[in-house]
Image (spheres, rainbow, N blue to C red):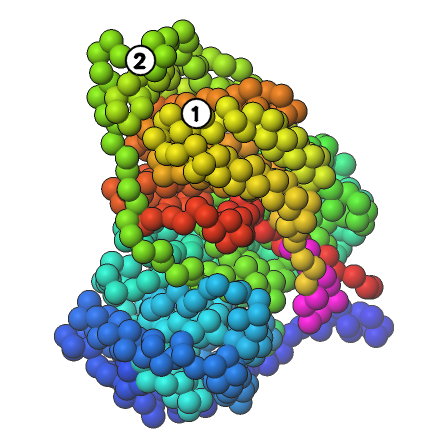
Amino acid sequence: MTILDRFKAMDYGPAPESRGEADQWLAARDLAKTLFIDGEWRAAKSGARFTTVEPATGAALAEISEASSGDVDDAVKAARKALSAWRKKSGYERARVLYAIGRGMQRHARLFAVLESLDNGKPIRESRDIDVPLAIRHFIHHAGWAQTLDRDFPGFEPAGVVGQIIPWNFPLLMLAWKIAPALATGCTVVLKPAEFTPLTAVLFAEICARAGVPKGVVNIVQGGPEAGEAIVNHPDIDKIAFTGSSEVGKIIRRATAGTGKKISLELGGKSAFIVFEDADLDSAVEGLVDGIWFNQGQVCCAGSRLLVQESVAERFIGKVKARMSHLRLGDPLDKNTDIGPLIAPSQLARVTGLVAEGARQGAECWQPASDLPQGGYYHLPTLATGVAPSNILAQEEVFGPVLAAMSFRTADEAVALANNTRYGLAASIWSETINRALETAPKLKAGVVWINGTNMFDAACGFGGYRESGFGREGGREGLIEYLARAKTKGEYRRIEIPAAKAGESEDGLIDRTPKLFIGGKQVRPDGNYALPVTTPKGRLLGEVGAGNRKDIRNAVAAARASKWGSATGYNRMQVLYFMAENLAARADEFAARLAALTGESAKKARAEVEAGIECLFAAGGLADKYEGRVHQPPMRAVTLALHEPAGVVGIVAPDEAPLLALLSMLGPALAMGNSVVLVPSERYPLIATDLYQVIETSDLPAGSVNIVTGGSAELAEVLAKHDDLDGLWCVGDRALCTTVERESAGNLKRVWTNAGHAVDWSDAARLADDFLRRAVEVKNVWVPYGD
């Protein structure tokens, strides 16, 4: 037998990680008191407990306190009490605490890793080499942010008391993603770990106590749905941060509507793994193993849809099957294990059911000839070929070791297949032609794109998705802003009532036309053929406008979607907005006279509003090619391009107050960033918007870039909120309208901003421009590795 034969015949021997320290840690604690509230360990008020189980064997690990709404209330009170002192601490003082937490975690890194693998079932290599080091990195990284907040985020303050709910697939890492930026920004925290995986959160709370975290700053409540619901609905929580399923994310969006709570949602995904014919196929296979079988596929950004170019598809699938045959299922504490158990019997049943349904719908499901370990919740890695784009395995998030494979012929077809999902979390592109990869990345509707790699993460680089994968970001500068807020302006939004038109009375005694709607670059009649009166403050008729309805909104959204404005360069958008401002300036006297007649304001005040609106347009144009992304340098051989992309089709519901200035303050930034717009102008003063038709028509804006639908603000705003092809919605109105918009937007989890019924200071141009520019973009992080 040759040396090569001996090498090929070698099998893996056992390489177990000791669990002795973890078992001693479990035995030494009173786990009936695992609620960490106001710096103390408590039992649940009800005395309730739940059992956490080892997925590899099904054996019980511990009995854990189960928080009720009363326990959550105590935790929120503790966080509220601690907030004032914590936010007043200097950035340096908070940085020292964050650094102490990170160092404490480093000293106990091995214990964290073993507990994580016992409680979650993930292989020890993953928890030891990925999860724990990255969790530590987040705390040390955010220690630096704590000291630079005043410089980098002027005018912002801590969001307040934050309620955080994390999943079971990355218990410690998700905890770090949530708590580190919250503490850095001066927020206090009430965090609920998943009931399947409570143990590392208990150890983390011990680290906090040793690291000098003040009492009440970090509160951890173990529990199930009751505790989670109590956090979401608690009136004294200022922000909700949730990671979990899209279905629960929608429930949270509806539950928080009208409460004024800031929310960020990191939800499900169905990520595409695209292999072009010029890819290094062997490297792509290894990347695919990491992309879909990492953590048993229980990863929101798992590359669960393989898209491989037709010319190499057969060869690549053969390589994938060969590699799958060598994947090792087994004890997660064995360092040679590739795939551990799923988290629970319910998850195993779900994955098994979805595979069966996928096969029933025509997929051919292949599994390697491997033996399943005895006991535990194991599922063989599964490759589904012959998958139609509509197959359940290509559309639904399986959250297990299941890969759906499809082929494509051209790059355009690959992009179409990749975007054929309601999710938009991540994607992976494999090609040795960097030009092709960088050309493809911006076309994918995904918040994170990895080139020739997968599952790369870092605290300095944002992570989060588009569409039903949620909104907001974790990590990086864009993740930090999620825990900051502007000070609320004083006063409530004031809706201006429309006086009844006096019969037979009109300004100048002449009404010769009714402005139509403006859709797709044309003036069109409203679908319902109804008109609404527009009067002076004294009730004299100034004119009439079309009463838009649901069908008009549908047509406007379709026109906006077809617009080519998003493909224009920033320089081109700058020139168009400058031209628009120039055309408005040429008619400034006319617009000022219109404003004065509509609002009853003095000619001087009306002229000042017009001039301020022109300045807003000019400022937005000037930033069209300057409000750019960033380049991050994570601690690996890669750069991350944080690209600013248009949010897409954005609906704007403008207020009655400052009707022209408010409209232009929102419209300018939206257009500057390449969004197309469906605008509902002030219901009380719509003529100021219809007068803009000629300005738009003569400013070289492509058809469909701006669509204006006049009518009842409340009715049309609700239609926009429910429209599933709208990507974003900005609405200014009273509290009832804002509540409706936020609640009804949950259908496709569009990005919504409202004034929550508060007054808006439209004179603060610099702040408004910064805020609306930030809302007008999605940040896509494209990872580009380099070197051999």
In the image, residue 343 above or below residue 706: below
Answer with left or right where residue 669 lies relative to residue 415: left
Q: Quadrant of the C terminus?
A: bottom right
Callout 1 amino acid:
Arg
Viewer-closest of 148 and 277: 148
Percent position of residue 37, x then y: 28, 80
Which residues, given as a range, are shown in magenta?
Answer: 633-643
Q: Residue at x 38, y 88 (%)?
A: 209
On the question of residue 652 being in view, the answer is no
Percent position of residue 633, x then y: 70, 66
**Label disc, if present, on residue 594 of the rendered structure:** 1
Residue that label 2 marks: 506
Residue reaching furthest to the left: 46
Q: Callout 1: helix, strand or loop? A: helix
Answer with left or right where residue 628 lies relative to residue 188: right
Callout 2 amino acid:
Ser
Viewer-closest of 26 and 65: 65
Q: First in sequence: mark 1 or mark 2?
A: 2
Is residue 35 part of the magenta span, yes or no?
no
